[in-house]
Image (tube, rainbow, N blue to C red):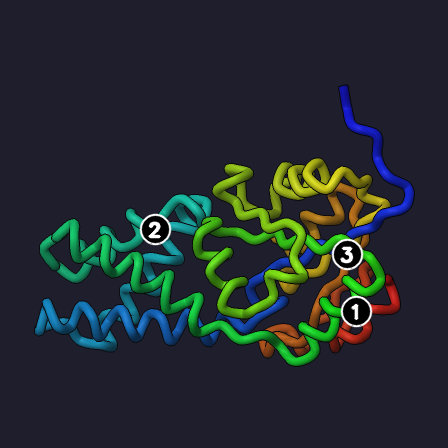
Amino acid sequence: MSRQRSDEKSAFIFDLDNTICDTIAAIQSSIKVCYKYLKNHYLDIQYDEFMSIEEDVFNYLTIEKRLPVYSFRAIYWHTIFERLNLSKNPILIKNVISLYSDQLAKSVELFPGIENLLFELKKRNKIIAILSNGDFLTKASMIEYLNISQYVDLLVASDMTQVDKPDPRAFRYVLDQINLAPSKCVFVGDERINDIEGAKKVGLTSVYVKWPPKNKEKFIPDVINVNSPYEILSLA
């Protein structure tokens, strides 16, 4: 039996990476930390080669192999070790996986205005959920270091849904958890395909954010385009 849906509540569902916080800069920092760690054990590793191989491996796994992001941490680092002709020491691989996730969480920073937005939405009794591609542990650590857990009612990562956005099942999972119809919810994200197109497929009002540097010159027709978090409050 399905639960009765509330007509009183409404929700804002946010992407996390590059919507709430600057993950691009944090990723670059985390990769450099991993390189320094491995350099202590494999003295012949060259920085430029390492960075080039890391980018190639990421693109290979996500674009060519189409592996979901939550699933490939182990194969990602195993493949990097293989491409660098490094011995696949399981403890070193375990350590670098943990180091990357920990450094990523510690390095992310909120975009200006985000905390005020979340604060105002909670004042207006809105449910706040986050739907992010990746694994729950890393995303929860990011929220912890960003110090915004007091605003977040629900965090869903793709190792929980077993699919990445833009798969409609990811969005429907969140809707089921908060027990609201799509018409009662707004989805906010920075990726045209993963976020906006995915959200539109399940009937969510879609908000495309333009504050990540890569989005400043972009515009998506037929959805709400915003230049600052403050503009989102008009939908609350």
Percent of width and height locating residue 33: 29, 73
The mark that comes first in sequence, 3 or 2, is 2
Q: Is residue 115 left or right of residue 136?
A: right
In the image, what residue occupies the spot 48% across and 49% down? 136
Residue lying furthest top: 1
In the rendered view, tell whether residue 226 sits above or below residue 192.
Answer: below
- Disc 2 crowd rating (10 Å Cα; few below 14, some 14-19, many 20+) is some
In the rendered view, tell whether residue 105 sits above or below residue 97.
Answer: below
Marks 1/3: CA–CA distance: 19 Å
Q: Amino acid at mark 3?
A: Ser
Q: Is residue 35 left or right of residue 109?
A: left
Residue holding disc 1: 120
Screen quadrant of the N terminus: top right
In the rendered view, tell whether residue 98 sits above or below residue 210.
Answer: above
The mark that comes first in sequence, 1 or 3, is 1
Marks 3/2: CA–CA distance: 30 Å
Instruction: Find numbered disc 1 in the image and state the secondary structure of the residue it sits on.
Output: helix
Q: Is residue 114 left or right of residue 136?
A: right
Residue holding disc 2: 73
Contact (CB < 8 A) between labels 1 and 3? no
Instruction: Find numbered disc 3 in the image and state the secondary structure of the residue it sits on.
Output: strand
Q: Amino acid at mark 1?
A: Glu
Instruction: Find numbered disc 2 in the image and state the secondary structure of the residue it sits on.
Output: helix
Q: Is residue 209 left or right of residue 92?
A: right
Q: Amino acid at mark 2?
A: Arg
Contact (CB < 8 A) between labels 3 and 2? no
In the image, what residue occupies the spot 8% across and 73% down? 43
Residue holding disc 3: 206
As rendered, which of 83 and 110 lies closer to the eye?
Answer: 110
- Disc 3 crowd rating (10 Å Cα; few below 14, some 14-19, many 20+) is many
The mark that comes first in sequence, 2 or 1, is 2
